[in-house]
């Protein structure tokens, strides 16, 4: 059997740019799919796949997944980074999908079988103040969720999504609009035109939100918060300490990858569980944090580190150090990528939690077989491979949207105009 074609396919049924790699083989009808979504720079991945990986891979044996990964990784000489890793991840997952179809087994079986009956999910809640946030969390709990990420947009706060104002810290318009974070569908938020974001009111007020939630909700729910690497390192350390009484499940991206060395200091200061990794693309960024036992959850975006093959190795490595998985799972992971997350979630003993995204009906139609979500959990359809398909004709009806900055992040600015991490 040989690889006969490798293609990157773009579609945006839910408004966000998605990139999926399809590998076809010399066996009629046997093909595989893999997520290669780099929402902010999708066409760079398309070029890497169609112009560089396709000629390198056509004619090769699709069963040699590890050799194809290693040789593709080295073929650019300079390696890693989100563009090449996403391209490689799309190929890698498609090859695993093919292997599962040949074996006639769902992928988690090839990874060692199920460690659990279903995959618990966390969802995102929030509101304009602590009371609205509490109501939002309660709404999810009533639907069966036991893990909820929470933030508010009340004065001084900034929600997880770039876009709303922090009252009292307004700045003049620069005519910019902000892209929302991966958790929410992209739309232009005009309220940001006068908005600014300041770290100090945020770190002062966030503990009040979690104090309120714990007082009102008790210990019946696991609470999560994402700092989105927005505050200076010493304020992030202070925030992690201040949140300690409220027993978070984890505090996410308290520091930027550029400030990795501060995790050594944070670890000595607080027992708040730490999740990290959404922006990591290189093993040099995450291996030391795991080896030195500085984090509790690895939160990488699987296609950004190079795909399922790397994620399996990383999960196993984490298990030896007591670090649990919490793969990134927003709307700019394609449904094919969510299926990959799910198969690893079933098979890894050191699974921690899975972030969910609820796709719209159009996305469900474009990607038949996507993992089912109900009762706060993800469930497998037990089909071979990743268990998901792509309706190419339908996908073509949802071309990449015209977006400000080509879909990239708009600057998030402080009240004096200084650009901040998004
Ligand atoms: Mg995050």
Image (spheres, rainbow, N blue to C red):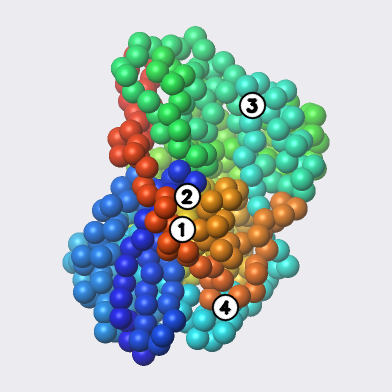
- Which label sits in the foreground, 3 or 2? 2
Task: Name the N-terminal-most of marks 2 and 1.
Answer: 2
Quadrant of the image occupied by residue 238 = top right
Q: CA distance from mark 1 to mark 3?
A: 35 Å
The residue that appears at 57% across and 48% down in the rendered structure is: 360
Q: Tell me which label, 3 or 2, sits earlier in the chain.
A: 2
What crowding class fits label 2: few (fewer than 14 Cα within 10 Å), some (14-19), or many (20 or more)? many
To which residue does mark 1 refer? 394
Q: Along the horizontal axis of the image, is 239 left or right of 291?
A: right
Q: Which residue is mark 2?
A: 13
**Label 3 element class:** strand
Question: Badge 4 is on which residue?
Answer: 384
Q: Position of residue 253 (x, y in %)?
A: 49, 41
Residue 206 to residue 286: above or below: above
**Distance of mark 2 from mark 1, alpha carbons?**
9 Å
- Residue 127 numbered tag: 3
């Amino acid at each position: 059997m040989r690889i006969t074609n490798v293609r990157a396919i773009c579609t945006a049924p839910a408004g966000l740019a998605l990139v999926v790699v399809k590998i076809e083989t010399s066996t009629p009808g046997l093909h595989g799919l893999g997520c290669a979504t780099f929402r902010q720079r999708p066409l760079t991945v398309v070029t890497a796949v169609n112009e560089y990986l396709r000629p390198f891979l056509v004619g090769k044996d699709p069963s040699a997944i590890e050799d194809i990964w290693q040789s593709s990784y080295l073929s650019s000489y300079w390696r890693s980074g989100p563009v090449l890793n996403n391209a490689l991840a799309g190929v890698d997952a498609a090859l695993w999908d093919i292997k599962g179809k040949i074996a006639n087994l769902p992928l988690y079986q090839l990874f060692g079988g199920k460690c659990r009956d279903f995959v618990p999910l966390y969802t995102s809640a929030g509101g304009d103040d602590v009371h609205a946030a509490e109501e939002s969390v309660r709404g999810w709990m009533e639907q069966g969720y036991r893990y909820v990420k929470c933030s508010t947009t009340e004065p001084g706060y900034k929600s997880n999504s770039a876009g709303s104002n922090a009252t009292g810290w307004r700045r003049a318009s620069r005519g910019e609009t902000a892209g929302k974070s991966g958790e929410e569908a992209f739309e232009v938020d005009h309220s940001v035109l006068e908005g600014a974001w300041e770290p100090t009111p945020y770190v002062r007020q966030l503990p009040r939100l979690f104090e309120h939630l714990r007082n009102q909700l008790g210990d019946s729910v696991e609470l999560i918060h994402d700092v989105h690497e927005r505050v200076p390192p010493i304020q992030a350390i202070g925030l992690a300490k201040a949140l300690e009484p409220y027993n978070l499940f984890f505090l996410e991206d308290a520091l930027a990858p550029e400030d990795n060395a501060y995790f050594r200091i944070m670890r000595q200061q607080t027992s708040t569980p730490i999740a990290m990794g959404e922006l990591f693309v290189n093993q040099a960024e995450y291996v030391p944090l795991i080896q030195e036992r500085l984090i509790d959850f690895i939160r990488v975006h699987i296609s950004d580190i190079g795909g399922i093959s790397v994620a399996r190795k990383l999960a196993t490595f984490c298990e030896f150090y007591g670090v649990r998985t919490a793969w990134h799972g927003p709307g700019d992971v394609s449904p094919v990528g969510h299926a990959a997350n799910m198969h690893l979630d079933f098979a890894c003993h050191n699974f921690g939690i899975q972030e969910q995204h609820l796709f719209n009906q159009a996305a469900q139609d474009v990607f038949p077989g996507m993992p089912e979500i109900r009762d706060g959990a993800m469930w497998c359809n037990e089909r071979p491979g990743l268990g998901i398909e792509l309706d190419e004709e339908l996908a073509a009806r949802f071309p990449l949207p015209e977006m400000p900055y080509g879909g990239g992040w708009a600057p998030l600015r402080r009240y004096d105009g200084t650009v901040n991490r998004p």
